Amino acid sequence: NDAPAAPKAKSVKFPVGWIVVSEGPGRGESFPLLAGMSQIGRGEDQAIQLDFGDNSISRSNHAAIVYDPDSKEFLLGHGGKSNIVRLNDKPLISNESLNSGDIIRIGETVLRFVALCGKSFNWTDGATGEDEDVAIA
């Protein structure tokens, strides 16, 4: 059988939000975010893998988005790389709060952040024993 193997479907449970590429290479791609830290870079090991031809994005940890289920808030952090990360057109120097609709720019790539969880909804609210087999980082 010479037919190519079908790609494995990604099983994402309990997304807390999404990142969508709104401009630049990869426009239209989206990435689910899970609780904990989601690193952004071009490498295969990155939760948000922006390997669409924008070489100004570092392979590893150019930036990171964190969702803290205890405080029910999102944060955006810079990975210490030389190319600037911009949040709503301002250079990101330290960790900043991230709100639904915010725009993140790295090189030629523009990302739009969409939150699901927050103060009004969180997967850990009302969790049942059935949810215990799913790791929420």
Image: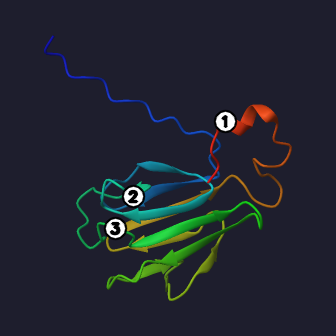
Q: Marks 1 and 3: CB-CB under 8 Å?
A: no
Task: Estimate how packed mark 1 is, as few (under 14), some (14 to 19) or many (20 or more) residues with alpha carbons within 10 Å.
Answer: few
Foreground pick, 128 / 24: 128
Q: Which mark is residue 65?
A: none
Q: Which residue bears the numbered disc 2? A: 46
Image coloring type: rainbow
* Amino acid of disc 3: Ser
What residue does disc 3 label?
A: 60
- Residue 81's spot in the image, x, y percent? 35, 82
Secondary structure under badge 3?
loop
- Tag 2, which secondary structure? loop
Residue mark closest to the camera, 2 vs 1: 1
Task: Please give the name of the residue rendered at 32% of the width and 85% of the height, measured from the top-left corner.
Answer: 82
Q: Tell me what residue is drawn at x 62 percent, y 45 percent.
A: 135
Q: Is residue 74 left or right of residue 121?
A: left
Point out the residue furthest to the right here.
Answer: 126
Whether residue 97 is situated above or below residue 41 in the rendered picture: below
Write down the quadrant of residue 131 in the picture: top right
Quadrant location of the N terminus?
top left
N-terminal of the two: label 2 or label 3?
A: 2
The relative height of residue 87 versus residue 60 in the rendered view (above or below) is below
Q: Which mark is residue 133?
A: 1
The residue lying at 56 percent from left, 73 percent from top is: 76
Q: Measured from the top left, where is residue 109 in percent x and y?
A: 36, 66
Q: Are marks 2 and 3 in contact (CB under 8 Å)?
A: yes
Q: Residues within 10 Å of mark 2 (few under 14, many from 20)?
A: some
The amino acid beneath tag 1 is: Asp
Residue 29, percent from left and from top: 41, 48
Closer to us: 137 or 47: 137
